[in-house]
Structure formats: C-alpha cells, structure tokens
Amino acid sequence: MNKESLPPEGSALRKLGAHLAELLDENQWAECERMLFEVVDEQQEALEYKANMVSKALHQAWVFGQTYWRQADSEYTSEHRKSDKTYKKFKTFVDEIQAAILTDRQ
C-alpha cells in the first residue's frame, strides 16, 4: 500500500487506526470489534440517508421536468416565461441537493 492511498495524517480514520493498533497490541479484540461495527453502522446510516435524499430529489426533478415541458410547449408566451423561472428553480434545486449530499448528516 502506498502512502497516497492512506487517509491524511490527523484524520479521524488515521486516529481510529492508531487506537485499534494499540488495542490489538493489548489483545483487546472485543473492543476492536465493537469499534469497527460502530463505524460500519454509522456509515450505513449515512448511506441510507443520502440514498433517501437522492430518491426524493429524483422525484422532484421529474415534477420539475413535467412542469417545464408543459410550460415550454404551451401556445401562450406567458407560459413560456414561466418555463424560464421553472428551469431556474430546478437549477437551484440541483445545487442545493448536491450541497446536501456532500455535507455530513446533521
């Protein structure tokens, strides 16, 4: 394993690794197992949260698309102007979802 594939010095993962190494040196296998399962559970919860967020975002994107299509395809210019606003709302929504997915779950 090369150094570039390791987490950065001082990161939570490096600290956990150092702590686990100490515990393993002391033959505290049960404590190591508990800590590892705790990390896995936290990661699973975060993944499920983000998957749920993506599912809701896809549904909302579909709604935006249907609204935009109806407005843009209308024979009335007032609806065409609305489609521009709908598109801007969609772009803002995409940026918000992306930011929410990239941040940690609060």
Image (cartoon, rainbow, N blue to C red):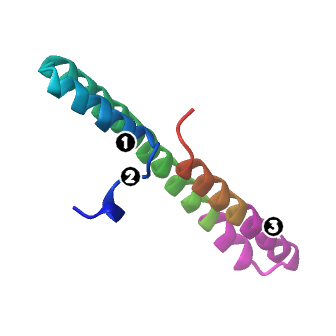
Q: How far apart are marks 3 and 1 (CA)?
A: 47 Å
Q: Which mark is residue 14?
A: 1
Magenta region, residue range: 66-89
Q: Which residue is drawn at 75% across and 65% down?
A: 86
Q: Distance between the residues labelled 3 and 2?
A: 43 Å
Q: What element carries label 2?
A: loop
Estimate the x, y position of residue 2 in percent, counting from the top left: 27, 64
Marks 1/2 in contact by CB < 8 Å: the verdict is: yes
Q: Is mark 1 on a helix, strand or loop?
A: helix
Marks 3/2 in contact by CB < 8 Å: the verdict is: no
Estimate the x, y position of residue 64 in percent, counting from the top left: 64, 62
Q: Which residue is drawn at 72% across and 77% down?
A: 72
Amino acid at dot 3: Lys
Q: How far apart are marks 1 and 2 (CA)?
A: 6 Å
Amino acid at dot 2: Pro
> 36 or 103, which lies in front?
36
